[in-house]
Image (cartoon, rainbow, N blue to C red):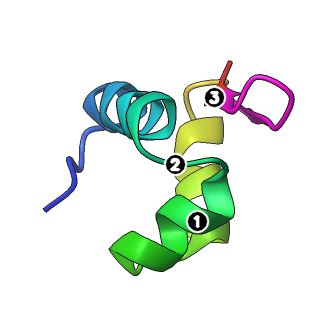
Amino acid sequence: MIPKDPVMLLSYVNTQLRDYYANLSDLCEDKQLNQQELENKLSMIDYVYDAGCNQFV
């Protein structure tokens, strides 16, 4: 289960991206997450996905 709180979600997602996934699409597919919903939730705390560094920044 992924965290609901945006700040905890940010930490969880960035850790997953760093340790296990080559990109956000792979993470979302594996965890069965809606990528747009995830990006929208993290944009609420002013974070966007940067494909170059494979992290939300």
Residue 25, position as x, y percentages in the image: 66, 65
Give the foreground label among 3 and 1: 1
Q: Residue at x 50, y 60 (%)?
A: 27
In the figure, is residue 22 to the left or right of 41?
right
Q: Quadrant of residue 12?
A: top left
Residue 37, position as x, y percentages in the image: 57, 67
Q: Is residue 53 magenta?
A: yes
User: Measured along the vertical axis of the image, is residue 34 above or below residue 22?
Assistant: below
User: Measured along the vertical axis of the image, is residue 57 above or below residue 44?
Assistant: above
**Where is mark 3, residue-wise?**
56
Q: Of marks 1 and 2, which one's residue comes earlier in the chain?
A: 2
Q: Residue at x 21, y 55 (%)?
A: 2
Q: Is residue 33 visible?
A: no
**Where is mark 1, residue-wise?**
26
Residue nearest the observer in this picture, 37 or 52:
52
Q: Are marks 1 and 2 in contact (CB under 8 Å)?
A: yes
**Where is mark 2, residue-wise?**
21
